[in-house]
Image (cartoon, rainbow, N blue to C red):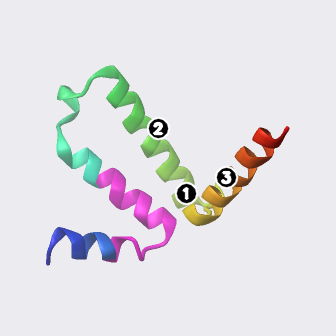
Amino acid sequence: MSAQDLIEQALQLPAADRAEVAAEMLFSLSPDESLDVDEREWIAEIQSRREEASRGAVVMRPWSDVRADLLKDLSQARAE
């Protein structure tokens, strides 16, 4: 299986599962002791968000919906 095949399969997963896969892949790149403070804080944030998603504490939305809302808001802000 190629990396592209794996990526395509992973993109078919629900958002919470994709977040978990992404976090695990990031964590596998370098040991914690070699990370700087900003990287540790980012990893802590990712872990926190992953836990919230796993608990169902947040509403997950498809990126396409979020992007459409952002573009709409940006368009409205520019029109003002």
Q: Which residue is mark 3?
A: 71
Given residues 78 and 51, the one toward you in this image is: 78
Could one spot residue 62 in this view of the protein?
no
Q: Start and end of the magenta stretch?
A: 9-24
Most distant residue in the top direction = 37
Picture quadrant where residue 40 is located: top left
Label 1 sits on what residue type? Ala
Left or right: residue 36 versus residue 47 is left
User: How many C-alpha atoms fall within 10 Å of the one at disc 2: few (<14), some, or many (≥20)?
Assistant: few
**Does 48 sit above or below residue 24?**
above
Q: CA distance from mark 2 to mark 3?
A: 25 Å
The residue drawn where x is 29% and y is 69% is 7
Label 3 sits on what residue type? Leu
Residue 19 in percent (x, y) is at 43, 58
Marks 1 and 2, the one that precedes in the sequence: 2
Residue 34 in percent (x, y) is at 17, 27
Left or right: residue 64 versus residue 73 is left
State the predominant SS element of the stretch in magenta.
helix
